[in-house]
Amino acid sequence: MNNKFSVIIPAGGTSSRYGGCNKLLEKIKDKTVIEETVSKFLGFDEIDEVIIPANISIMEELEELFQDSKIKLIQGGNTRQKSVYNALNVVKNDYVLIHDGARPLIRKDIISCVLDAVVDKGAVSVMTKTTDTIKEVDETGRIIRTIDRSKLYNTQTPQGFKTSIIKEAHEKLKDGNFTDDSSMLEYLGIPVYIVNGSYTNIKITIKSDLDFAKLYI
C-alpha cells in the first residue's frame, strides 16, 4: 500500500461523566489511557502523523508524554466536532482515521482493516452487531415495540475517510454538534460502510470501564 494516512485522536473533553480527573490521564498498568490509545497507531508504515486536538487543561501533561515527531499536539475546540475540524485543517495526507482518545483497547488488526477498506470505500466505520434486544419506549415509560436487531449495529472508532470528503462535510455542517463523524456523511447522503469491530473496543466513560480495561490489558 502506497497511500499515507493521518490519524486524529480527539482529547478535548473534560471527562465530566468520569468525575474527579481527566480519564485520559488515568493509568492502565504503566501507561496513561491516551498513551495506550496512541500506541496502537504507531508502528504502521502507512501512518506518518498522529494529531491530538487537546483540551488546554491537559496540554502541558501531553507535551511531556509525547516526544515522537509523528505526534502533533494542537488545541481542541469546545465540542468534539470542533476539535476534529481543527485537526482536519492540519492533516497532510489524502486519508485520515479518527479515533476516540478513550478507546485504548482497539486492536491493530482492526486498524489494518480500516486502512485497507477506506481506500476502497472512501468512508468506513468500525461497528459491532447489536446483541441486546432493543425496545422502543414512549414518554410514559410504556414499551411500544421490540425493534428487529438483525440490522442494528453499535458504532465504534476508528472511522476512516478520504480527507477531502470528511473535511467538506465538516465545513458544510460546521454549526452542528455531531458526536461522531460518520453521522455527518449520513446526514449529507454520502455512503459509509462498516468494518467489523470487537466487543472489547469499549470507550472509557466511567470508572468501571477503566477497571475492565486494566483487566483486559
Image (cartoon, helix red, strand yellow):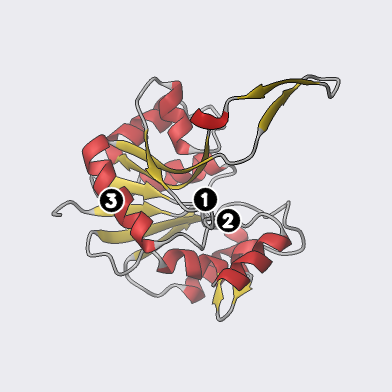
Q: Mark 3 = which residue?
A: 115
The secondary element bearing badge 3 is classed as: helix
Image position of 16 with respect to 172: above or below: below
Q: Nearer the viewer, residue 9 or 202?
A: 202
Q: Mark 1 = which residue?
A: 76
The structure residue drawn at horizontal position 31% and vertical position 60%, both measured from the top left corner, is 49
Judge from the rendering whether residue 134 lies leftward or rightward of residue 190; answer left or right: right
The structure residue drawn at horizontal position 54% and vertical position 28%, both measured from the top left corner, is 176
Disc 2 residue type? Asn
Q: Earlier in the sequence, mark 1 or mark 2?
A: 2
Location of residue 33 in the rendering, given as x and y in whole percent from the top left corner: 56, 67
Q: Mark 2 = which residue?
A: 55
Task: Measure how far apart labels 3 and 1 are at the Cα level.
Answer: 25 Å
Location of residue 96 in the rendering, given as x and y in whole percent from the top left corner: 32, 47
The secondary element bearing badge 1 is classed as: loop
Disc 1 residue type? Gly
Q: Earlier in the sequence, mark 2 or mark 3?
A: 2
Q: Nearer the viewer, residue 9 or 197?
A: 197
Image position of 205 with respect to 181: above or below: below
Judge from the rendering whether residue 209 lies leftward or rightward of residue 122; answer left or right: right
Count the marks.
3
Q: Are marks 1 and 2 in contact (CB under 8 Å)?
A: yes
Task: Measure how far apart labels 1 and 2 are at the Cα level.
Answer: 6 Å
The secondary element bearing badge 2 is classed as: loop
